Amino acid sequence: MKGWLSMPAFSSPSKPSSIRMSVIIPVRNEERNILNLLQDLEQQSFNHQQFEVIVANDNSTDSTSQIVSSFSERCRYSLRVIHLTNEPHSSPKKRAISQALAQSNFEWI
C-alpha cells in the first residue's frame, strides 16, 4: 500500500500519441453489461479518433446486438458490431477474436 501511495500522479504527455488501436470485445448474451462497458470506453482520455471498438457478437439471443447498434449512433468513437459466422471451432472466444481481427483497421489490438 505504501508503494502505491508514493507513486507520482499520472499526467498525459504534451505531444499527442500516434498509436491507433482496435479494441475487440467478444460477447454472448451480455445485455446487462455491454452498455456500461461501452460508456466507460467513451470516458477514456485516449483520443476517440485513434481507436475503434469491434463487438464480436457470438449468436446472442438477448438484446446485446441492438444495444451496441443503438449506442454506436451516438458515441464519439468508431463502434461496430460484427456477427460471427458459425464455422466450427474448438474455442468460441478464439473464433470471435480471429474474426474481429480480420476486420480491424489498426495494428495495435
Image (cartoon, rainbow, N blue to C red):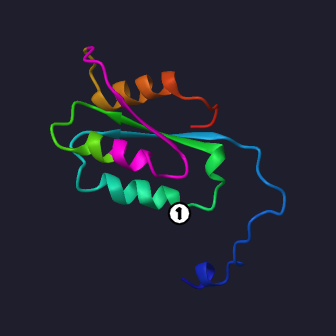
**Furthest-right residue in this view:** 15
Q: In the figure, is residue 48 to the left or right of 11?
A: left
Q: Residue at x 64, y 56 (%)?
A: 46
How far across and how far down the image is residue 14, in percent? 83, 63
The picture quadrant where one finds residue 65 is top left
Q: Residue at x 26, y 44 (%)?
A: 64
How far across and how far down the image is residue 44, in percent? 57, 60
Check disc 1 and report its element: helix, strand or loop. loop
Q: Residue at x 35, y 41 (%)?
A: 69
| Residue 83 falls inside the magenta stretch | yes
Q: Residue under label 1, please give it.
A: 43
Q: Is residue 3 above or below residue 18?
A: below
| Quadrant the N terminus occupies | bottom right
| Quadrant the C terminus occupies | top right
How far across and how far down the image is residue 2, in percent? 59, 85
Q: Is residue 26 above or below residue 14?
A: above
How far across and how far down the image is residue 104, in percent? 54, 29
Q: Residue at x 55, y 41 (%)?
A: 52
Q: In the figure, is residue 18 to the left or right of 40?
A: right
Instruction: Please provide the residue range marked out in magenta.
Output: 68-87
Three-letter code for the amino acid on which mark 1 is drawn: Gln
